[in-house]
Amino acid sequence: MASRTTHPDPVLDTRSLNRATLARQLLLSRAAMSAQDAVAHLLGLQAQNVKPPYFQLHARLAGFRPAELAELMESRQVVRMVTMRSTIHTHTAHDALTLRPLVQGARDREVTSFRKGLVGVDLELLGERARAFVEAEPRTMGEIREELLTHWPDADPQALSVAARCRLPLVQVTPRGVWGRSGQVRLTTVEQWLGRPAGQRPQARSVDDVVLGYLGSFGPASVKDMQVWAGLTRLREAFERLRPQLAVFRDENGVELFDLPDAPRPDAGTPAPPRFLPEFDNLLLSHADRTRVVAPEIKGRTWAGNQAHRTLLVDGFVAGLWRLDAGLLTVELFERASRAQRDEIVAEGERLIAEMATPEGRGSVRFGSIRG
C-alpha cells in the first residue's frame, strides 16, 4: 500500500482561510481608513458598473460616504481603466500608472485573438494614431472605431476597437463613474488625464512587489490564485524568488499557499458580521479556489448568465443575494438563518439604506426572492 505524502507546512482549513482573507479585505470590521488608502490597499476595485466601487468601500470602511470616492474621481486621484483580467477597475492614480504595464503583455496577447480582423493593420501605427486622437480630446469607443476605419477601411470594426483598448492605457473620464451623475463612456490615455508626461511617470511596479501587495490584500494564496486575479500566467518564478521571506502553508487539499509572515490570520472562530457586497466584488473573483468564501453547494447561484448578483455574507460566507430599489432592500437567503443572524442582517441592511440608498435615509428590509 502506497504511503501517504505528508507536508511539513501548517494546514489552514477553510474557515481559517476565510477569516484571514476577510481580515485583509477589511470585511471582519470596518477600517478607519480613507477611501484613497483603501483603494490602494485593495490594489483596485472591480468596476464594470459605476456603483459597485462605492458599495465595496461602504462594506469595508467606517464612516464612508459616496461623496468621498466621487471627489477622488473628480480630482483625478483615482481613475477607471482596464487592468487585471481585461476588466475595468478603479485604481489610485499611482497604481493606474504602475500596474497597467504589468498586464500589458496579456493585453497584447488578447489582440492576437482578433488577428483575422486586423490583416494589414500595423498595430504600432494604430496605437500612435489612436493615442493622438484620444489625447486631442476624450472620445467614445464608437468615435475611436470610426477614426481607425478611415485608415484601415477593410479591417473588422470590433477588432480595431479591441486593438485600441489593448494597445493604449485608456481611462474613462468623468463624469462617468461619479456617484449621482451620469455620463457617456469617453476615453483618453491615463498619461493625458493625469497630466503625466512619460518622463514624469513613476516606474512600473515589479512583479515581486505586486505579489507582495496581492498577498497583503488577498492572502494566504496559491500561485494559481494570483494568476487568476491578475489574468497572468508564469508567476511561479516570482513566488520562488520571494519564498525565503514568505510564510508557507497548505490548504486542506494539500495546495501550497503563500503569505506575508506578519499578515493577520485571525482565529477561525472570530465573528464575521453580515456584509452586503455589490456585483463583481473583488472578494469573489480573486482566487482560483473560491471555496474560502463560496461553499461548493451554492456555486453558480450568484450568477445569472454572465451577470453577477449582489451577494450577502453571513458568518463570512456567501449566504444570499440582495436587491436595493430606492429604500426597499430585498434579501434572498439560500438557507434558513437564526433569529440572531436575521437581526444582524436587518441592522446591516438598515445601515446600507441610511447611508447609500435615499437622501432621507429611510427605508425597509424584507426577506424574499429577488428574482420573483
Image (spheres, rainbow, N blue to C red):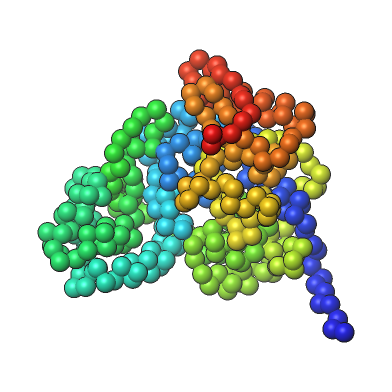
Q: How many marks?
A: 0
- Residue closer to the observer: 309 or 354: 309
Out of 227 and 133, give the one closest to the viewer: 227
Q: Quadrant of the C terminus?
A: top right
Residue 228, position as x, y percentages in the image: 54, 61
Find residue 233 and report its horizontal and vertical position in percent.
Answer: 51, 69
Residue 135 can be seen in this image: no
Rendered image quadrant of residue 118 = bottom left
Q: Is residue 366 visible?
A: yes
Residue displayed at 58% across by 29% down: 330
Residue found farthest to the bottom: 1
Q: Is 363 displayed left or right of 263 in the figure?
A: left
Q: Position of residue 259 (x, y in %)?
A: 68, 59
**Residue 296 image point, x, y percent:** 68, 55
In this view, 52 is above or below 116: above
Give the position of the N terminus as an image quadrant.
Answer: bottom right
Q: Residue at x 24, y 68 (%)?
A: 117
Vertical arrangement, residue 22 with respect to residue 63, above or below? below
Q: Residue at x 74, y 35 (%)?
A: 337
Front one among 269 and 309: 309
Say which residue appears at 79% left-offset and 67% top-offset: 9
Q: Nearer the viewer, residue 44 or 5?
A: 5
